[in-house]
Amino acid sequence: MTDPHHLAADDWPALSGGTAGPAALRPLLEEVLAALSAGAQRRGGPIAAGRPAEAADRVRAALADATGPAALARLTELLAHGGADPADPACAAHLHCPPLAVAAAADLAVSALNPSQDSWDQAPAATALERELLAELAALVGFDPAGSAGVLTSGGTESNLMGLMLARDRRLGPDVELDGVPPGVRPRILASQAAHFSVQRAAALLGLGERAVRAVPVDRTLRMDPAALAEALAATAREGAVPVAVVATAGTTDTGAIDPLGPVADLASRYGAWLHVDAAYGGGALFSDRLSPLLAGVERADSVSLDWHKLGWQPAAAGVFLVRRAETYASLARRAVYLNPADDEEAGYPSLLGLSLRTTRRPDAFKLAVTLRTLGRAGLGRMVDRCHELALAAAELVRAEPALELHCDPVLTTVVFRYLPTGTAGSAVDPAAADRINAELRRELLRTGRAVVGRTELPAPAHSSNAAGLVRLKLTLLNPRTTPSDLADLLAAVVRAGRRVEQSS
Ligand SMILES: *Cc1c(COP(=O)(O)O)cnc(C)c1O
């Protein structure tokens, strides 16, 4: 038979798998690595200077002239130059970690082979590996590995949705699958004011409505007040509403505060509510002997969210969802005749399909398994401790700088503070002006390419010399190679940017 395309197999574009894949990849990887290096060099800092329109113009120009085999190097250089690089000590805004080289290399192996976790016959080894890794992570959390279950997810957003889905199905029964919330039922999810916004979004997606989420007050560090949770649960009972779930946050996105997990678990169990612990950030503390006591009580959760693309140094995505009792995982189970037929399962072919909201799914467990084997829990624990120490050092530097004000002591690896306008040190400051200057100085640091600093809004501390103003700056420290002197330079740059903004306004 003649091939209508008149091409021999070897004339088609090279593939990454098979015995020939590595040879095809090697020269391309050399190009990628050279371009990554050239792009980082040309950037010369945490982010390229300029406004968003200039960055967009550079992208359009590169897309227009990158064609054929040159596209890979040209666009990789563009990506590296145009990145916000968390490996630079001055890039410290978000829970956006610098990935470990070994984890990125492991992820390359995954990309080359492309296993998919939705059926055993697409991923024989990766299926078994995910189960082994989940048992290790269950033990890390304090669950019985034999009785628990879990899955790798795209992150805390998906894990929180899954936890609340299982909570809804357990509390409101199977009818909810067909009909939404049964008539007359008023569901409630109790989460702190500082809980991640994905909790509200999950409530909306699950048909419970965003208003089902009741915000429990927090203290100045953003830690849930257990007395306020007790009151909110009592009010739920008085109103005849159903406490579907209590969400505790172990590491708020802004301050790293950890809700009092023991008292929260007591209250959830007293009211028969599912306890979901969102440890997307704070889960990393489990690697550290020094910090893991902060998460005491997490082993009592019905479900837990963990994110190793935050305090775990993995390339995104590396989310994990765990449930303490595998039997509570029931409502996601799925039978697809082309993926996990019952006779295959009876014949001993396992399937992860019914554990995930997704179908096609990368084996994100792989890079984490490699990392844990390479560094061990202790190696990751040292990295967590180092970042915690950097946060304490940054807090000391902020305290020693009259132009800056610390919001609260660091809990994990985040420091929240603000710039105090000079004209007003010691006297009352116009809160609107302070907020404007803090917001603008952060954009000034981005525009000049000097630093990527976080920004949030929090209530002013009671002892503040300036009674009001909400805008805060934050450093989320996830780079163990950062030094205290890098932090001093970064904070000095913040103060200089503040002065410049003040002078020009
Ligand atoms: C980051 C974060 C999330 C969302 O996780 P993604 O991985 O971004 O989906 C949820 N909860 C908390 C506390 C977080 O910090």
Image (cartoon, helix red, strand yellow):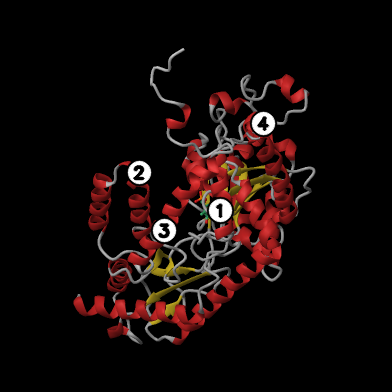
Q: CA distance from mark 4 to mark 1?
A: 24 Å
Q: Nearer the viewer, residue 97 or 189?
A: 97
Q: Nearer the viewer, residue 347 or 440?
A: 347
* First-in-chain label (3 vs 2): 3
Relative placement, left or right, of 96 versus 134 is: left
Q: Residues within 10 Å of mark 4 (few under 14, many from 20)?
A: many
Give the amino acid at mark 2: Pro
* First-in-chain label (2 vs 1): 2
One can see residue 379 in this view: yes
Relative placement, left or right, of 64 versus 362 is: left
Q: Is mark 1 within 8 Å of ligand 1?
A: no
Relative placement, left or right, of 74 versus 454 is: left
* First-in-chain label (4 vs 1): 1
How far across and how far down the image is residue 403, in percent? 37, 83
Task: Identify residue for label 1.
Answer: 105
Give the amino acid at mark 4: Trp
How far across and how far down the image is residue 221, in percent? 53, 68
Give the amino acid at mark 1: Ala
The reply to whether discs 3 and 1 touch (Cβ–Cβ < 8 Å) is no
* First-in-chain label (3 vs 4): 3
Quadrant of the image occupied by residue 230 = bottom right
Q: Nearer the viewer, mark 2 or mark 1?
A: 2
Q: Tag 4's secondary structure? A: helix
Task: Identify residue for label 2.
Answer: 69
Task: Identify residue for label 4.
Answer: 120
Q: Is mark 4 within 8 Å of ligand 1?
A: no
Task: Identify residue for label 3.
Answer: 34
Q: Nearer the viewer, mark 4 or mark 2?
A: 2
Q: CA distance from mark 4 to mark 2?
A: 35 Å
* First-in-chain label (4 vs 2): 2
Q: Nearer the viewer, mark 3 or mark 1?
A: 3
